[in-house]
């Protein structure tokens, strides 16, 4: 029966006759449009036949592919496309299955034209919104095949480009078809993302090669304006833009693996470009997930080469800056914690020379200069990210970094590595560099919140260390915090300008918050500036930083009281250079003289007191004639011109405290305070920060006021507490405890073994003693008050109170109502 029907076309089913009629005798004539319209009308009128139409078209296409009749293959695919576009009935699912089967057959072909044809049909299908869901459709084959096409290595460059672009379009179609359909296979699964994302990145990676071989714009046809790299970038942006919160991790992980496998972290140009695409494509609230992925990858590569880690950090820097404009969320401190941890690890690697802490035969030797480059990259990243944070988060970051800085102490462990440097010292330097990067450009109206007590204490304790580089970093950090009007660069060089108006300083009135800050912390700042001036290892940069700090305090935080204290401080620094109890070198003494001259020249013009300005100007002019080595123009140059003998400096060359107090006192300043020489008050913190060996004696002068006699107060001599006295005190306290324990044991034993009469007699004696003491107390407290009528004199001229009953007392008339 069926055989007869197959031979006789009149007996064949109608849908088959309609399908056969759309194919012309000559395939070059193309699809018969009138018959195609009949087939479409039939499919719409009888939707239950649609699946059979699709199955028959699929059968003919497979037969034509096998017979290499590619013209009829193209006609069949065109017919399928038109049916798909026209039909949206509930039975379309079965038709789609036949359609996808034919597309898969074309993609399996080795002919590039058939692969491109199948891809184009699939892209058209992907743009169709189906009315009915599909529960069993799978796109695994298409993901794999399109990914393979993206990596085409055809000999013909033009064909290779077309195949790659078709593969990218196919992946784009798969994403569009499945990403928003919950009933479809989850395209975000790692098995799919591990194919899609690397395929797109592979084409992005070869953008330079494609650009170098592509024809010039004048020669290129207008139709081929888009390259595989541009199409891949567009597809990647679309993919990431559709990613939900839970899918970001699966989309980012293949990117990191691809960059690892192809060693793309070291040039870091492509890696930065990839993550810029990612950060600008995803939703802003998902930015912190990308940052977390990068941080985790950095930790996972903590033993990789320094160049690889530096590349990851550079990418992290770019991504973090973009993320900060959106939402970074809780990853702020996590990011800084990871970066600082990597910084510490890098310091250890540079010191030990290996990743395992010990050099062995199989250990990879670390290049120290590469670790230095990585450390600088971390510090740069810390600064660039912190600069984008709001003020309150930046303050938290500053406190967080400061808490990681090793505190100076007498018992600081000294760990030497291959370079013989101290691990703690390097850690302090790197963290202070990071802190300097964060503090640069920091703007805060309230200095109490910008420099809280706990932060300032730790920072200033670091300023008293022996290391000159660390002290310089601390001074620069203080300058960054205090400079709120951009005046810092105007004091980069020390000079005695006759008119400071050329500096164009931005000066505002000291606010109430700044006044409170200076009242609380001014003496602490002055003390550390004074002690920093006395360091032997100071160089020109230290004096420039000290001058800048003094100048900025005068501009940003100064009122009349602060100005007086700063002048006293600078005059004390002049005394240090003159008396030279610290045995400072000649350069240091000349530098202190020059520093004082430059600052007093500045503050005299800021106060605008004519007599004060005249005195400073006279001393400076005298120095120019007789002692130019005491001015900054001769000291702070490449080749300083110094004096061999600074003993016995003439009075005319010095700024006199009496003269300054006289001229400023006449202008309303506190002359009494100006007359007092500045003496810093050393604290325990300063002593702990001093450089001493562990075996050196710690001398703390303790002054104790004697309060045993109420009639006179005497100060006992200062007791010197040394190691022996501390040891003796500990031994004595142990002996006292032993004696007390023995006395208690004897009392308990006595009450347990002694006769009753002895115990009673002992308790009676103690009771009588207690009673006598109580009687004395009662006699004192119950004594009647003295009579208001006066006192009578007893024998030997001693006055004696005379008790009068209250009812007999005589009160003044004013007390009577």
Image (cartoon, rainbow, N blue to C red):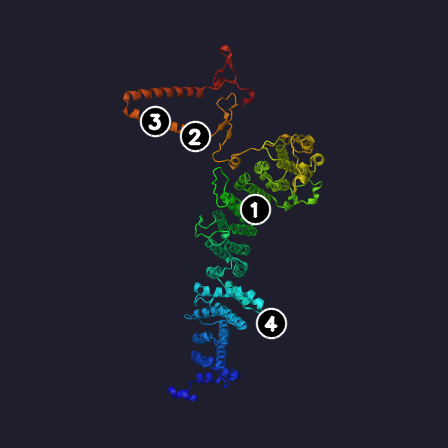
Residue lying farthest to the top in this orientation: 795
Dot placed on the residue nearer the N-terminal end, 1 or 4:
4
Q: How far is disc 2 from disc 1 in space, using C-alphas?
A: 43 Å
Question: In front: 306, or 34?
Answer: 306
Q: Which residue is mark 3?
A: 742
- Residue 300 seen in the current view: yes
Q: Which mark is residue 415?
A: none
Which element is circle 3 on?
A: helix
Residue 734: quarter of image: top left
Kindly state the secondary structure of the residue where label 2 is placed: helix
CA–CA distance in space, label 3 to label 2:
23 Å
Q: Name the residue tied to disc 4.
A: 220
Nearer to us in this view, 9 or 492: 492
Query: Dots 3 and 2: beta carbons under 8 Å?
Result: no
The answer to which of marks 1 and 3 sits earlier in the sequence is 1
The x and y percentages for residue 743 are 35, 25
* Image quarter of the C terminus: top right
Mark 3 nearby-residue class (10 Å; few <14, some 14–19, many ≥20): few
Q: Position of residue 753 (x, y in %)?
A: 27, 24
Secondary element type, mark 4? loop
Q: Is residue 364 above or below residue 210?
A: above
At a point 33% along the width and 22% down the height, the residue shown is 763
State which quadrant residue 270 falls in: bottom right
Numbered marks: total: 4
Q: Which mark is residue 727?
A: 2
Q: Which residue is mark 1?
A: 436
Horizontal side of 28 relative to 500 (left or right) equals: left
Give coordinates of residue 383: x percent, y percent.
Answer: 56, 50
Mark 1 lies on a secondary structure that is helix
């Amino acid at each position: 029966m069926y055989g007869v029907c197959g031979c006789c076309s009149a007996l064949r089913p109608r849908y088959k006759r309609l399908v056969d009629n759309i194919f012309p005798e000559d395939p070059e004539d193309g699809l018969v449009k009138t018959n195609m319209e009949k087939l479409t009308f039939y499919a719409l009128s009888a939707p239950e036949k649609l699946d059979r139409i699709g199955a028959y078209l699929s059968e003919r296409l497979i037969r034509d592919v096998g017979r290499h009749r590619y013209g009829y293959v193209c006609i069949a695919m065109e017919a399928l496309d038109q049916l798909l576009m026209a039909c949206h009935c509930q039975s379309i699912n079965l038709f789609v299955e036949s359609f996808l089967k034919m597309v898969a057959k074309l993609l399996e072909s080795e002919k590039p034209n058939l692969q491109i044809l199948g891809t184009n049909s699939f892209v058209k299908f992907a743009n169709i919104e189906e009315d009915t869901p599909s529960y069993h459709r799978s796109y695994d084959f298409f993901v794999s095949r399109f990914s393979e096409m993206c990596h085409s290595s055809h000999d013909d460059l033009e064909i290779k480009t077309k195949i790659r672009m078709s593969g990218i379009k196919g992946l784009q179609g798969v994403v569009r078809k499945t990403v928003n359909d919950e009933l479809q296979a989850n395209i975000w699964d790692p098995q799919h993302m591990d194919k899609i994302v690397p395929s797109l990145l592979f084409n992005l990676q070869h953008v330079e090669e494609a650009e170098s071989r592509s024809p010039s714009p004048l020669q290129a046809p207008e139709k081929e304006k888009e390259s595989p790299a541009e199409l891949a970038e567009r597809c990647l942006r679309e993919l990431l833009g559709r990613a939900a919160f839970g899918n970001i991790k699966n989309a980012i992980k293949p990117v990191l693996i691809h960059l690892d496998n192809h060693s793309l972290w070291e040039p870091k140009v492509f890696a930065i470009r990839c993550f810029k695409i990612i950060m600008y494509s995803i939703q802003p609230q998902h930015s912190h997930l990308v940052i977390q992925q990068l941080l985790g990858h950095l930790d996972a590569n903590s033993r990789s080469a320094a160049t690889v880690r530096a590349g990851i950090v550079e990418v992290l820097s770019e991504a973090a800056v973009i993320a900060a404009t959106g939402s970074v969320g809780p990853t702020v401190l996590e990011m800084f914690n990871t970066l600082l941890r990597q910084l510490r690890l890098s310091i250890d690697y540079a010191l030990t020379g290996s990743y395992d802490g010990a050099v062995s035969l199989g250990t990879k030797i670390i290049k120290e200069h590469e670790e230095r480059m990585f450390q600088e990259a971390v510090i740069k990243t810390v600064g660039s990210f912190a600069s984008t944070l709001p003020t309150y988060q930046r303050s938290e970051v500053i406190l967080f970094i400061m808490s990681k800085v090793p505190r100076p102490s007498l018992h600081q462990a000294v760990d030497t590595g291959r370079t013989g440097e101290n691990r703690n010292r390097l850690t302090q330097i790197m963290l202070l560099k990071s802190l300097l990067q964060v503090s640069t450009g920091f703007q805060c109206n309230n200095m109490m919140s910008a420099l809280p007590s706990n932060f300032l204490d730790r920072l200033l304790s670091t300023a008293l260390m022996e290391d000159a580089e660390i002290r310089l970093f601390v001074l620069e950090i203080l300058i960054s915090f205090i400079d709120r009007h951009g005046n810092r660069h105007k004091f980069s060089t020390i000079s005695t300008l006759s008119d400071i108006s050329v500096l164009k300083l931005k000066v505002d009135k000291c606010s109430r918050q700044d006044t409170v800050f200076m009242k609380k912390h001014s003496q602490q700042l002055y003390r550390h500036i004074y002690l920093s001036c006395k360091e032997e290892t100071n160089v020109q940069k230290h004096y420039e930083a000290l001058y800048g700090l003094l100048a900025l305090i005068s501009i940003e935080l100064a009122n009349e009281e602060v100005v007086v204290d700063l002048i006293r401080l600078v005059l004390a620094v002049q005394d240090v250079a003159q008396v030279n109890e610290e045995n400072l070198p000649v350069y240091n003494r000349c530098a202190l003289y020059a520093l004082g001259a430059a600052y007093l020249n500045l503050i005299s013009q800021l106060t605008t007191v004519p007599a004060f300005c005249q005195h400073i100007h006279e001393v400076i002019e005298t120095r120019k004639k007789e002692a130019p080595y005491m001015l900054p123009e001769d000291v702070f140059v490449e080749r300083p011109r110094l004096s061999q003998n600074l003993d016995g400096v003439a009075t005319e060359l010095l700024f006199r405290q009496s003269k300054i107090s006289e001229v400023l006192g006449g202008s309303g300043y506190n002359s009494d305070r100006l007359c007092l020489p500045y003496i810093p008050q050393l604290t325990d913190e300063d002593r702990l920060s001093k450089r001493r060996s562990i075996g050196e004696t710690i001398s703390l002068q303790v002054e104790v006021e004697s309060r045993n006699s109420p009639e006179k107060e005497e100060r006992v001599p200062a007791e010197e507490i040394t190691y022996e006295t501390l040891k003796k005190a500990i031994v004595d306290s142990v002996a006292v405890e032993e004696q007390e324990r023995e006395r208690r044991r004897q009392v308990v034993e006595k009450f347990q073994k002694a006769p009753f009469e002895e115990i009673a007699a002992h308790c009676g004696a103690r009771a009588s003693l207690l009673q006598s003491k109580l009687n004395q107390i009662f006699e004192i407290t119950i004594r009647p008050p003295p009579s208001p009528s006066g006192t009578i004199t007893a024998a030997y001229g001693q006055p004696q109170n005379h008790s009068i009953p209250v009812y007999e007392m005589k009160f003044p008339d004013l007390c009577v109502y």
